[in-house]
Each structure stands twice: as structure tokens, then as C-alpha cells.
Amino acid sequence: MVFPFFKKDNKQKQTGSEEITVIKELTEEEVYQKTAATLKDLITPIGFEIKSSYLVFSNKVVKTFFILDYPKFLNTGWLSPIINFGGLVNISMFFHPVETEKILETLRKRATQLEAQYLSEQEKGLIRNPELEQAIKTVEELRDTLIQGVEKMFYVSCYLMISADNEESLEKLEKQISGILKQKLILIEPAVFQQFETFESILPLAKDNLLDVKKTFNSGPASTFFPFISPNLYQNSGILYGINIQNNSLVIFDRFSLENANAVIFAKSGAGKSYFAKLDVIRSLMTGTDIIIIDPENEYQQLAEALGGSFFRIAIDSQDHLNPFDIGELGEDETPQAAFREHILDLIGLIKVMIGEITPEEETILDQAIRQTYAARDITPDTPYFGKEPPILEDLETILLSMESGKNLAQKIYKYTKGTLGGFINQPTTVDITNRLTIFSIRDLDEELRPVAMYLILNHIWNTIRKEFKKRIMVVDEAWWMMKNPDSANFLLSMAKRARKYYLGLTTITQDVDDFLRSPYGKPIITNASIQILMKQAPASIDSLSQAFVLSDTERNILTSLAVGEGLLFAGEKHLAIRVVASYIEDQIITTNPEQLLKRKQQLNG
């Protein structure tokens, strides 16, 4: 018996009539070399069927093509539609340098033929031939550039391979690819009876098997084959948003240079959306932009402390209060009557968020009661009302109780005045948002009160924004809370539509994609944002996002495979994959990583 792990020694011993073969043990390295599978063993399919016009292996139908003809002029990036195509397309290109002396000799002969033809036509008295004149000019220019060393010549071959689960799908894919290239006057042909040779040319073996299909190009046209045409986003002004993953270039731009400065950020929990937003805040502050933030989880408190911002805790037991009956100062193009009327509509919207839907009759009663509440403080549309002490919610309740048809509404408002939620909204305003960084925290509010608080805060901010025209960014984190209620969602959409007029950029952040998009106001908020950032997503949310953002198959795959801190950035017509980067100091201020926070706390206590 011969064992594969042993080999025969060349020496043999003779004992009587028997011949004994001496066996010696192999070394570990020799055993490995004899038994280890090669790369070819690992990647070679079990079976391989070669047809005249396609191949079949690994349960796939594969077809290969070569480019037969090109137009006279090739534009840069002509291969991009094929590279970005949703189906699986493999491309292989070969560039064979041609000796300049040989090509110059060929061009000299060609120039001689063209000149002879030109003189012959002149002698015959034929009319001017512009095509012949252009051909002579092109050949002479190419000769000049070759002699000067400006251009080089190449034989170029280009192959494509597509694959599908069956012949029907393969044929459909072939028509799509062929149609895309025909629009650019590029003709492809299947490698009939040479499918395997072309397939081998596409493999990373550096074997160009179909030399008879090569075409001659000089450096300029040959450079258009370069497939990696990745977009850049770089401006002389603005802030650093990250690094372009495709080419490692910096992504720097000014959001206020786009059609509008609104942004939406979608990501699953822990993907880095708040981290990205905080970096945007820090760097925007350095450019002179004021920042206002609605913080649902106290994630921005450390940011306020580090940068000297104002942090207001909105809660039932807090000393920070906002009175919804405050009337902000007039905007530059507003009349007192218009401002008063709009403020009453905002109050009605807030009360709807507080108590739920109301009937048209109740809305009319509420309108009358609000006007009477203001009139009791000598505030009417036709009288100067700025500087006067505004009423509070309890005053409205008193007016409603005095109206026979308003008692039902007064009972619903009761819990916000003297009931369990009293003190939250029934106080004069005590906050001042004149600081360049202002943060409103609503973490300590019950879930029921969060939409109310968001609506109230946004309304107060909006009145301040209209009062003074200046460059601002407002960040609404976990905006899906507002999308739960039609009135608060509509208010957020209204801000998104009108923000540009007041030099405001609205940043909307959410992790609950489905809830946000389920609202009829979700898609319009997205379409009114020139900047859209999609970070790592849960597979269950991909379909919703694909419909909302019209994602390609490639972008869908990217979203599910991104690392923390990476995302797709859509800025106007630019689509880039970026990696968010922060300096050490920035990271220490904005991190929400529990491990880092615990380590920092231990260092402070130790």
C-alpha cells in the first residue's frame, strides 16, 4: 500500500528474493504543497457547458460580447451608464501600445493616398469634397502630435459579459445593454463560437484572445475608456462634510448655495446620524451661522456646554416655559392684521395637536374664544398689541367656560391648565433664544406631550426667525414624532417650504423611516430638501427609501453594507458615498458611543 503522505526513497534493499522499498516521511511543507487546493481548484465551476452564443455554469447563463465599432468622437465617461447599470455586467479592456515609428509610417502612406485622391478630384474638375479635406487635416494633425510626443497610439479591445438565471432574462438584459450603447453609436456583437475565448479575456488573466477585433486609438479617445468617473463636490466656501469614499477627495460645500438649504437625514439607530448632525452644527457655527436644535434625547447638551450655547429643558416640572399666546414681532413684509390672523391659525393647530381632531363647529367656537381671550388683554388686530402682556392657556379655558357651546372644549383643555399636565404650557415665556446656539430638550416629557412640545417650540422659533433676518440652521431630531399628527406634520412642511425666504436651513432627522414616509407630508418634506443624507439602513426600510429617493440597485446595496459614519449624500444632482470624519476634539464633544462616555466618566471620577 502506498500512502499519499509518504514517498519512496530512491534506495532499495534486497533481502533474499524480496525487494523492500524504504519509505521516508514527508515534511509538513511537502504535505501541504501536495494536498492544498490551488486557487484554480477553488474558483473553477463543477460543470461548464459551451454553446455557440452563450455559456452555462454555476446555474447561470452567461454571454460575452466585444465592441465592434465606435463613433468618430467619444465623450468622457461614455462607459458610465454601463458601469452604473443595475444588472451584472463585467467589462474588460486591453490597451496595446503601438510603436510610434510604425504608426507614423502607416499615417504617411495614408496621407499620401488622401492627397493623391484630392489632386485627382481637382484635375477632374469635381466640386470641393469637405470630408476628404477633413480627413487630410486629421491625419496631418495626428502625425504632428505623434512626432512631438504629445500623443501615443494604442490597439484597444473591449469586452463585456452579462449573466442571468435563464435565457429569457439574458436576452432582455442584452437588449438593454445594446440599446444603451447604440444611443452612443457604439455597436456590440456577441462572440459567436468564441464565447469561451472571450470569457477567458474577461477573466483577470491578462489574456486578449480576440486580437482581430482591436481598434486603433490615440491617447485622447483611449482616455475616454477610463471607467472610474466618480463625482466630486468641492467649493471654495462652506464646511467639510466628509471624504468621498470613491476617490478620497474632500466633500466641501455651502448648503446655502443650493436651491434651498434644507436637509433630511435618515439612518437606523447607531448609524451615526446625530454624530453627522453635530459635526454640521460645530462647523456651521464657525462660518457665522446661528443654530437652533430640538433635542428629544439630551444628545446635544454636552455640545451646548462645550460651545457656550443655551440649553432649555422643556418639561412639566421645568423652569423653562414657552407661552403659545406670545405674538412675535412683525416680519419685514407683514401687516399687524396678517400676523394676528396667522397666529390664531397656529394656536388652533396647536390645540388640535393637544386634544385631537375637532369638528368644524368646534373650530369656529375656538376661533371666537381665542379672539375674545386676546381682547380681554386689549389685544386686537386693529390695535397696537406689541409690548402688552399676552394671555395664557388658562385665560382661554375661562372664556370657553363662559360660552355655552365651548364647555366641551374647556374640559379637554383642563388637563393642560389645572390637570396632570398643568404647568407645562400654562406659563409666561421664560426662554430667550438670542444665543447663537440654542437647544430645546424634550427628553423628560411623556410620549403624549412630545408632539405638542415640538409644535410649540417650532412655532416659537418660527416667530423669532421672521422677526430678524439672518443666516440660521434649525435641526429637528427624531422628526417622526411630528409626523404622527397631521397638524404638526403640516406645520413642519410649511416651515420647509418657507425656510429659504427667511435664510433658514431646516435639517430633519429620523430613524423611523416608515412612519415618516407613511405620512402624506413626509414625501413633500423630502422633495423640499436639496440635501439628503442616507446612512446605514435596516433591510426592512430599503424598499420605502428606494421609492422615496428613486435609488438604483447599486445604491440599495450600498445602503445595507455601509459602516457606521458612512452614507450616501445627495446634494442637488450630485450623488456621493461619503465617510464622516471628525478631529479628536470634535469627537470628544459630540460622541454618543456608550463605551467612550463611560471611559470618560471613569477618568473624571478617577
Image (cartoon, rainbow, N blue to C red):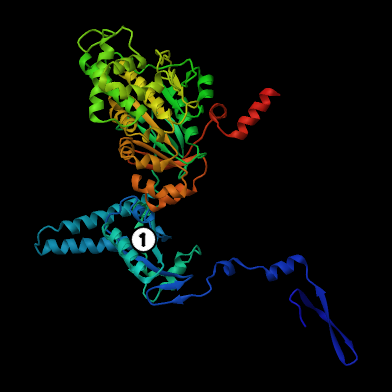
Task: Indicate left or right for 348 with 207 as reference.
Answer: left
Quadrant location of residue 172?
Answer: bottom left
Give how far across and how far down residue 316 sits, in percent.
Answer: 47, 21
Q: Nearer the viewer, residue 600 or 347?
A: 347
The residue located at (55%, 67%) in the rendering is 43
Asked if residue 182 shows in the view, the reply is yes
Q: Which residue is mark 1?
A: 103
Task: Indicate left or right for 101 with 304 as reference.
Answer: left
How many numbered marks appear?
1
Indicate whether 229 appears above or below 529: below
Q: Nearer the viewer, residue 360 or 289?
A: 360
Label 1 residue SS: helix
Q: Nearer the viewer, residue 380 or 292?
A: 380
Give how far across and how far down residue 120 sits, in percent.
Answer: 15, 64
Q: Residues within 10 Å of mark 1 (few under 14, many from 20)?
A: some
Indicate whether 545 appears above or below 598: below
Quadrant location of residue 179?
Answer: bottom left
Asked if residue 555 shows in the view, the reply is no
Quadrant location of residue 138?
Answer: bottom left
Give how far across and how far down residue 57 sits, in percent.
Answer: 47, 72
- Which residue is at the far right? 16
Indicate whether 129 appears above or below 41: above
Indicate whether 106 appears above or below 262: below
Give how far across and how far down residue 149 sits, in percent.
Answer: 39, 50
Q: Which quadrant is the N terminus positioned in? A: bottom right
The residue located at (51%, 19%) in the rendering is 307
Q: Nearer the viewer, residue 327 or 268?
A: 327
Q: Which quadrant is the C terminus positioned in? A: top right
Q: Amino acid at mark 1?
A: Ile
- Which residue is at the far front? 404
Task: Indicate left or right for 464 with 202 as reference.
Answer: left
